[in-house]
Amino acid sequence: MSLAGVKTEGKSGKEKTWTVSDVLKWTTQYFNSNNISEARLDAEVLLSYVLDLERLKLYLEFDRVLKKEELNDYKSLIKRRLDFIPVAYLVGQKEFMGLGFFVNKHVLIPRPETELLAETVINKIKEGFPYSFKEKTEKVELVKESIPQIIDLGVGCGNIAVSIAKYVKKCKIYAIDVSQKCLEVAFHNSKTYKIEDKITFLLGSLFYSLEGYNLKGKIDFIVSNPPYVKTTEFDSLPLEVKQEPYIALNGGQDGMDFYHRIISQSLIYLKEEGYLILEIGDGQKEEIVDLMEKKGFCSIQVVRDYSGIERLILAQKCMFKGKRN
Ligand SMILES: C[S@@+](CC[C@H](N)C(=O)[O-])C[C@H]1O[C@@H](n2cnc3c(N)ncnc32)[C@H](O)[C@@H]1O
């Protein structure tokens, strides 16, 4: 009896019927013996995709017998999973910040630790940043609300930009990527959540496409989860990660290329007190903090992710002394 191979006969020689429970048990063992890391979870996600059922509802349908077509669809997914194609690409979906994002092989699959970056921006805006400002006309003094202006460098599938736009009432985001295919996916995801009006999608390398938008000195947040894998480490990445776009991963010889470029150019676009918030790789903190200090950033802060790894760096453009009242 085999599920991934062609044979599906029971001991009696008759075609075996497969229930949800049988299929999950068999696939979990099969994945385990083929070094697929999250065997049970992957088996469940793939089956819920084939049956168009929420994953947890599988548990209510353990005795459901799979139809022949369902079984065939499931078998072909199992085979592709054995080629180390990530489950998110197989089902075209990944959850981030409680939202479902369409993904394909052209975009990096959003990682749970990146939620820390999106949450940090959302929380700062909800706490009131950027602060309202006073504007004097001839007769009255008006308190004007600032609409946060944000640049997301390397938008990928749009996970960071779309989550911020979804959870923050008013904001304007410039979402940039060097890959047209990423921008198409990100735009699609922004439409899913009907927040496309809050985001301007721009094709180009880092800040280049912002020329002409008159944004210098006007940005409240520059955020990025840039490519930060060292070129020399690429060969030792897990096979699944190697299926993701090389340009989304490769951070140059020492993994630092993007940090140098982003840190030196951010000051041009940030407002005084505006934040630069970067996701970083394990062990990159010191070099990045050092770079930020040399460029004159203030209030540099490092935040650990839920695994205790230093994952996020926040820094502010210093305020021009004596200006605040
Ligand atoms: C690590 S991925 C991050 C994707 C997404 N923001 C996330 O957090 O999952 C980096 C992204 O940067 C993009 N990228 C690579 N080089 C770039 C460049 N020079 N300018 C802008 N984006 C670039 C890649 O296409 C990729 O989408």
Image: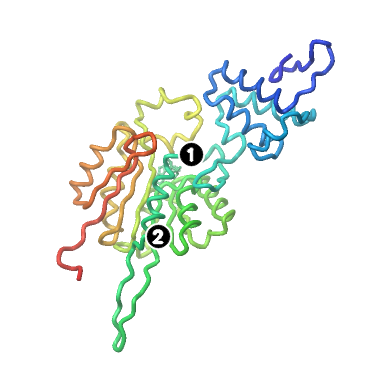
Furthest residue to the front? 60
Q: Where in the figure is residue 88, as x and y percent of width and height?
A: 56, 36
Q: Is residue 53 left or right of residue 257?
A: right
Residue type (three-letter) at the residue carrying disc 1: Leu
For this view, does 301 lie left or right of residue 236?
A: left
**Mark on residue 126?**
2
Q: Which mark is residue 108?
A: 1
Say if disc 2 is inside 8 Å of ligand 1.
Answer: no
Q: Is disc 2 in contact with disc 1, using a CB cutoff of under 8 Å?
A: no
Give the residue type at disc 2. Answer: Lys
Residue located 69% across and 20% down the image = 4
Q: Which secondary structure lies at badge 2? A: helix
Q: Is residue 275 left or right of residue 169?
A: left
Return the disc, 2 or 1, that comes first in the chain's sequence. Answer: 1
Q: Dot 1, crowdedness within 10 Å: few (<14), some or many (≥20)?
A: many
- Residue 35, given in percent of the width and then of the height, sits at 53, 19
Q: Nearer the viewer, residue 44 or 192?
A: 44
- Does mark 1 have its CB less than 8 Å from ligand 1? yes
Horizontally, is 10 left or right of 77 in the view? right
> Residue 305: x and y, percent?
37, 39
Disc number for residue 243? none
x%, y% of residue 50? Answer: 70, 35
Which is more toward the observer, 27 or 60? 60
Secondary structure of residue under mark 1 = loop
Query: Nearer the viewer's eye, disc 2 or disc 1?
Result: 2
Separation of disc 2 and disc 1 at Cα?
28 Å
* Figure check: 237 above or below 105: above
Q: Answer with the quarter of the image where residue 225 lies.
A: top left
Looking at the rendering, the quadrant in which ligand 1 lies is top left
| Residue under the image location 74 percent in, 14 percent down | 1
Instruction: Tell me the quadrant of the picture where the C terminus can be found.
Output: bottom left
